[in-house]
Amino acid sequence: MSARTEVELAATVNGQVRAMDAVTGATNALDWLRAQGLTGAKEGCAEGECGACAVLVARPDEQGGTRWTAINACLIPAASLDGAEVVTSEGLGTPGELHPAQREMAVRGGSQCGYCTPGFVCSMAAEYYRPDRRACDPGPERGPNGFDVHAMAGNLCRCTGYRPIQDAAFALGEVPDDDPLAARLSRPAPAPRATVLDGETAFVRPAHLSDALAALAETEGAVALAGSTDWGVEANLRHRRVPLLVALDHLPELRTFEVTPERIEIGAALTLSEIERALAGSVPLLEEMLGQFASRLIRNSATLGGNLGTGSPIGDAAPALLALGASLVLTSVRGDREIPIADYFTGYRQSVREPDELIRSVRIPLPLLPRSSFLKIAKRRFDDISSVAVAIAADLDDGVVREVRIGLGGVAATPLRAVAAEDALRGRPWDLGTVAAAATVLASEGTPIDDHRASARYRAAMLEQSLLRFHASTTEGVAS
């Protein structure tokens, strides 16, 4: 990360360097872009659920080049774009020469009122330029061109209907050799640079982890940011303001990924999309969880550190990591300490993490328990908050439960291990009688409440059914 002494902030937007003269730490990227006259991106929900604000940013790929990545501009601070390269819907094409995603949306009737269309087009363009898209096999949710329809899961349409939008996505062909945005992929993404912005809400992107830790230790009320998918909602909808925002998303010390014979270590500032690519299915429980975690737009920014740092009882990552027996490395100016995730949460949105501490990494012990499942109960199949989340990992050796871990979310003030249900299974035969008795115990775990997402009774019933479903999935095709 390069350091600099000047205060001026600037970003390259649609190929043009634009100064951020009127930006404060409280200005989000969407508001700044619209103030530049780039009004294709819209505010629809201000919480990252509708995708009307989607734009493309140039992020590093795993080969030293660039990956065009779609993100929610309404959530991130504008100052986090300092030094970045951004493409909005206006930069994809021109009225006389539309981008293929724009053209297909137009000719196939994918746009009616047009409010959501620029965001859809940006998400489509990110998938259009995905390097391995054409190598993917077609399927129920993947087009003959390899286009993954879940690339648009975070974009909501309020009037046209999704069939013509999907038709437009599935009609995108090969990327032409002379496409300038495709040519850009072979060159490195902009190097992150240290950023300092003073004001009532100050913003700093330190050059080193030690600088970030010092800032958190010195400023009471400072908030650490990575993808800003949680903070952006707090700032937009609850108008929360703090004296200092400390950006961590580019710190190399928090972006590590290492696999040893003993464990997998995942840096807390890696985005969930980066984690998906790095794991490549090697941890099936995380693969299953990540596919149901919000939307691709959110996963392109959200991090494990941020998801766990909020202490939310309904975050999807915690139940899966509990079932995996993971631990967290916390760091501060005083040094590092490792905490089992089962001991991390202490109350509603509370944890053992001190205000000046960061989550440095997540450690998953190896070998993994061989059978696992992640069940998410929500009102929508994708891009929704869990009513109940259940993660199960087990070693079922010769018809006996040798080891089992069950992580729960949405049924108590904190994510928790279902210890009583685990004890009812461990060392016993993996048969319907054992599982039914343990499922009854599981239904009594936690202290579920009635709210707008589900009733306490429904949540308890889903706990019971989750174990029965897991048993059925492990015994399908086995003669009784």
Image: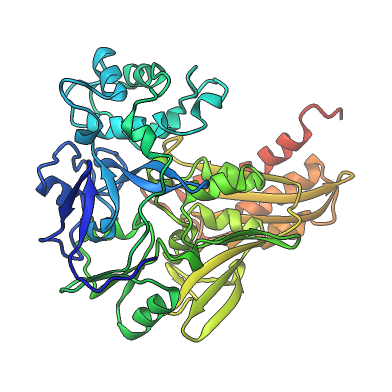
Q: Residue furthest right?
A: 398
**Residue 96 versus residue 197 in the image, above or below:** above
Identity of the residue drawn at 35% across and 53% down: 190
Looking at the image, residue 51 sits to the left or right of residue 311; the answer is left
x, y percent for residue 237: 22, 55
- Of residues 8 and 400, the one drawn nearer to the viewer in this rendering: 8
Tell me how the rendering is colored: rainbow
- The image quarter containing residue 217 is bottom left
**Viewed as shown, does residue 399 lie left or right of 14?**
right
The residue located at (68%, 48%) in the rendering is 439
One can see residue 198 in this view? yes
Location of residue 163 in the rendering, given as x and y in whole percent from the top left corner: 35, 17
User: In the rendering, at what x and y percent does residue 56 appear?
Assistant: 31, 41
Compared with 303, 127 (above or below) is above
| Position of residue 233 measured from the top left corner of the image (x, y, whole percent) | 28, 55
The total of numbered circles placed on residues is: 0
Judged left or right of residue 35, residue 181 is: right
Q: Residue at image x 30%, y 21%?
A: 161
Give the residue at x 78% y 40%.
Answer: 432
Q: Quadrant of the N terminus?
A: bottom left
Which of 330/405 is in front?
330
